């Protein structure tokens, strides 16, 4: 008989050495359970050393281990013993697989953030220095992500040393290390005292911005925004602004792409005046960049950028570029523009929207690429708030009606999904005139997804305008279609009825909808008959018990004796459901 406390560790060790990766993974994921069984002391003395020596070669196992150790402080006896977790995590920081290293760094940050100050100085910082001086570049890459945890607790002399070490990492021979230093510079800078920012951090930042590897420079772009927020506005203008302007003309499109993505954040850092004088021209250059990817990133930020400017500047500088982009040769650029351009309406105001933006909206609504049209349709409400419904309907509604018959079914689908929102904005009268017929037409579409969405649309309109309106304008037209010669369209109507019934209430359901369903049970197509059984099942909770007994049950009994097996199955299911409801109510 195995001694009970020894048992879990024995199983763990066996499974950790097992050839089957799944067993090794399972045992790693159960580490917390095993640690609880062992108790805090044995976890510290046996389990953690064992994990430190565990040289598993499977990255999935190592990744799971790195993750588990991040939340292990309670199992080793709390914060005062947190330092025992550092050795296994340090080993994981050196492995080749990037995702394992990243997870180990994340776990070390989590552990370090909870450690006591003296433990950080005694254990965490020496580990950080070992990693930073590591022979393998992987160790140096990992070390960059730990400085912001170690720095605040370090004594003055150590702080100076840490800043020096970070400076060396920024000039490392390996681009991967410099990349990591550039990525983490903002986090590290946030913990550094203001006087040292200009003296120590800015030179590091300048080195990274002039790196010969574009992958390092593009990460330095992210640092621009982070550092800009830490510096005084005048320092920001002196040190960060020239870097951004030169980056916006960088020879590598990837760097320009990053600038285009980050520019509006950088505007906040440098303030309104330099934005107008320096960043607007830089942004205009990016909007006209010769690389489509850069134009996509810049176009996607056009509304955010305009928010920072006043409307005059936006109209003067940005709108001409927007007009060019709306006819850009790349469909992806036009799509990115379409997804945000509606947001410009509130910024530019009513007159400029009518004069300048509406023609652009119309050209994008008629774009040959479906995604461009979709992006415009889904944001119409933002324009409606600015120019009002009358103008919107005069200018854009013809285009919407055209799209409702678009040959791409996904475009038709997007229009349908937008109809209830449009209906609530346009009001009943307008809806009846212009869009009512369209909604009925979609119920007879050739694509199932459109018919399905059209049935849901009918329900949402009934909810929006109320049962009385629906009884007058929707129900008669829907019920007329139950006689369509094609069974697939008849099935759509059955679905529409089952969706409408809960909205219309018991009275209208019994008088108008139920007779049509009962009648359809005589259909010659089995698919219709078993759908009738499903619809009747959904109507049982809505109508009175007397109607169930008099009308629904006899129909279901008849269907349950149908020659078709599926019809019998669904009819029997509906009868059982009816019995259950009767039992519950009695």
Image: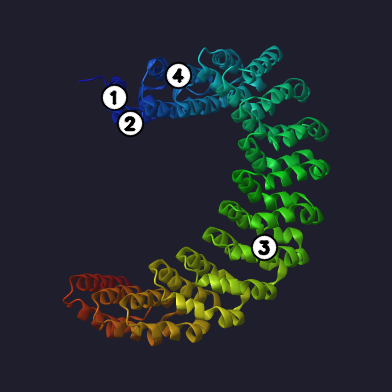
Q: Residue at x 39, y 83 (%)?
A: 481
Q: Is residue 553 visible?
A: yes
**Residue holding disc 1:** 15
Task: Tell me where residue 242 sits by quadrant.
Answer: top right
Q: Nearer the viewer, mark 3 or mark 2?
A: 3
* Side of 570 relative to 545 (left or right): left
Q: Nearer the viewer, mark 4 or mark 3?
A: 3
Disc 1 and disc 4 in contact, CB within 8 angstroms: no
Q: Quadrant of the C terminus?
A: bottom left
Q: Residue at x 61, y 57 (%)?
A: 338
**Residue holding disc 3:** 360
- How many angstroms separate mark 3 from mark 2 (CA)? 57 Å
- Mark 3 or 2 closer to N-term? 2
- Mark 3 or 1 closer to N-term? 1
**Residue holding disc 4:** 88
Give coordinates of residue 297: x percent, y percent. 62, 46
Task: Tell me where residue 36 sits by quadrant.
Answer: top left
* Side of 129 relative to 584 (left or right): right
- Mark 2 or 1 closer to N-term? 1
Closest to the observer, 337 or 43: 337
- Mark 2 or 4 closer to N-term? 2
Q: Which mark is residue 26?
A: 2
Residue 239 position (above or below residue 480): above
């Amino acid at each position: 008989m195995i001694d009970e406390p020894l048992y879990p560790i024995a199983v763990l060790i066996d499974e950790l050495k097992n050839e089957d990766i799944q067993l090794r993974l399972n045992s790693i994921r159960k580490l917390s359970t095993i640690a609880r069984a062992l108790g805090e002391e044995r976890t510290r003395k046996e389990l953690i050393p064992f994990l430190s020596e565990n040289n598993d070669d499977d990255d999935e196992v190592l990744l799971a281990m790195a993750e588990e150790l991040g939340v292990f402080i309670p199992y080793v006896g709390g914060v005062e013993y947190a330092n025992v977790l550092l050795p296994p995590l340090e080993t994981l920081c050196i492995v080749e697989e990037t995702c394992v290293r990243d997870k180990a760094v994340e776990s070390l940050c989590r552990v370090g953030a909870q450690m006591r100050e003296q433990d950080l100085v005694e254990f965490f910082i020496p580990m950080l220095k070992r990693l930073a001086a590591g022979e393998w570049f992987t160790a140096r890459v990992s070390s960059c992500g730990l400085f912001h945890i170690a720095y605040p607790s370090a004594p003055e002399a150590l702080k100076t040393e840490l800043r020096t070490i970070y400076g060396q990492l920024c000039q490392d021979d390996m681009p991967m290390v410099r990349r990591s230093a550039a990525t983490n510079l903002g986090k590290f800078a946030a913990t550094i005292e203001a006087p040292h920012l200009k003296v120590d951090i800015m030179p590091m930042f300048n080195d990274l911005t002039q790196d010969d590897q574009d992958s390092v420079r593009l990460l330095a772009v992210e640092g621009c925004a982070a550092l800009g927020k830490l510096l005084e506005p005048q320092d920001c203008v002196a040190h960060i602004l020239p870097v951004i302007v030169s980056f916006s003309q960088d020879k590598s499109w990837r760097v320009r792409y990053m600038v285009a993505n980050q520019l509006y954040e950088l505007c906040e850092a440098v303030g309104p005046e330099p934005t107008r004088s320096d960043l607007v021209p830089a942004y205009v250059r990016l909007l006209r960049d010769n690389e489509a990817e850069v134009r996509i990133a810049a176009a996607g930020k056009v509304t955010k950028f305009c928010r920072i400017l006043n409307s005059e500047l936006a109209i003067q500088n940005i709108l001409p570029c927007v007009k060019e982009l709306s006819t850009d040769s790349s469909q992806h650029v036009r799509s990115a523009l379409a997804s945000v351009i509606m947001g410009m309406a509130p910024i530019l105001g009513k007159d400029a929207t009518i004069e300048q933006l509406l023609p652009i909206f119309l050209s994008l609504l008629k774009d040959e690429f479906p995604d461009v049209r979709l992006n415009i349709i889904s944001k119409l409400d933002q324009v409606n708030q600015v120019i009002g419904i009358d103008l919107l309907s005069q200018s854009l509604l013809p285009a919407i009606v055209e799209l409702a018959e678009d040959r791409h079914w996904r475009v038709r689908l997007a229009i349908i999904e937008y109809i209830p929102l449009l209906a609530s904005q346009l009001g009943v009268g307008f809806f009846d005139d212009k869009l009512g017929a369209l909604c009925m037409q979609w119920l007879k579409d050739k694509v199932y997804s459109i018919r399905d969405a059209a049935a849901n649309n009918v329900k949402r309109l009934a909810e929006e305008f109320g049962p009385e309106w629906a009884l007058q304008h929707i129900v008669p037209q829907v019920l007329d279609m139950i006689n369509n010669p094609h069974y697939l369209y008849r099935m759509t109507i059955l679905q529409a009825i089952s969706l409408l019934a809960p909205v219309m209430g018991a009275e209208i359901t019994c008088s108008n909808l139920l007779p049509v369903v009962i009648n359809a049970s005589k259909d010659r197509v089995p698919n219709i008959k078993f759908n009738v059984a499903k619809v009747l099942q959904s109507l049982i909770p809505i109508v009175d018990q007397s109607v169930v007994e008099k009308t629904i049950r006899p129909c279901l009994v008849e269907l349950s004796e149908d020659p078709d097996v599926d019809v019998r199955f669904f009819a029997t299911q509906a009868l059982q459901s009816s019995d259950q409801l009767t039992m519950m109510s009695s």
